[in-house]
Image: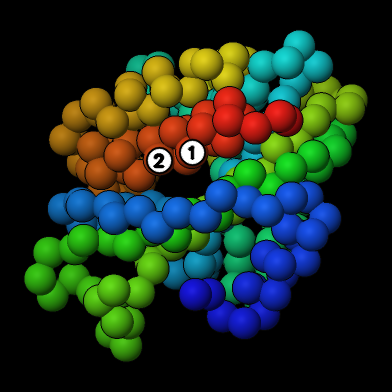
Amino acid sequence: MLPPAIEQEITELSQRFGTPVRRTVLIANEGLFDPLGKPDRYGEVCMVVRRTNGKLLTARKTFYPDNAYRLLTGGISHGEPIFDALLRETEEETGLEVEVRRFLAVIDYRLERPAGKTPPNRPKNAPSFHTFAFLLDELGGTLACYDPDERVEDFRDVAVAELPVLAGHLRQLGQDFNPDIHGRWRDWGRFRAVIHDVVHETLTSEPS
């Protein structure tokens, strides 16, 4: 369970946009990596932007491995409402006018860290990070990332059916350490793959 104020917002968002799938996922990794190691956030929003052509928006950053496209995400600051973060991050990372259509998923990640790596004052079985995914329909605007710190190199539209392919590619990334994510690509890729599988499941199992 998240703190009561966050659980209350999840309930309110569920009433507005539908009840999300909720999953707890164990991530086995060699160490922390961004965003899991960032102290300025407890989780992130995943912006599942459905373009006017019916496909979903993905992006690749300048320092990512080749063809490592993924759904867009943005951090939620401590004390920031989930919905505020969703609108802010969508504007900063896409510049598009959107309508929120569905609350798709809440994913609670539990990290299986090496001995001694659990942060102080945190129970070993406590979720370490949270992703809140929403389906957004593009209404207008010009696609562009307005936050240069994001270092977005390219956008790509993909069909819903392609999400498992993206997830598979992310899971197969190499063991190389990368200073931009403060960790290893394989750990990062396994973590990032999860939301693609869950979003694919939610969009293919129910009317959207």
Horizontal relation, residue 39 to residue 4: left or right? left
Between 62 and 42, the one nearer to me in the picture: 42
Residue 63 screen position, x and y as percent: 40, 30
Between 25 and 63, the one nearer to me in the picture: 25
In the depicted structure, whether residue 131 falls above or below residue 166: below
Tell me the amino acid under the disc marked 1. Answer: Val
Labels 1 & 2 near each other (Cβ < 8 A): yes
Residue 144 screen position, x and y as percent: 73, 27
Between 11 and 177, the one nearer to me in the picture: 11
Q: Residue at x 40, y 40 (%)?
A: 194
Instruction: Provide the residue designation for mark 1.
Output: 198
Instruction: Provide the residue designation for mark 2.
Output: 194
Q: Quadrant of residue 44?
A: bottom right
Q: Residue at x 18, y 71 (%)?
A: 117
Tell me the amino acid under the disc marked 2. Answer: Val
Q: Quadrant of residue 123?
A: bottom left
Give the number of the disc on residue 89.
Answer: none
Q: Residue at x 79, y 39 (%)?
A: 101
Residue 34 screen position, x and y as percent: 38, 52
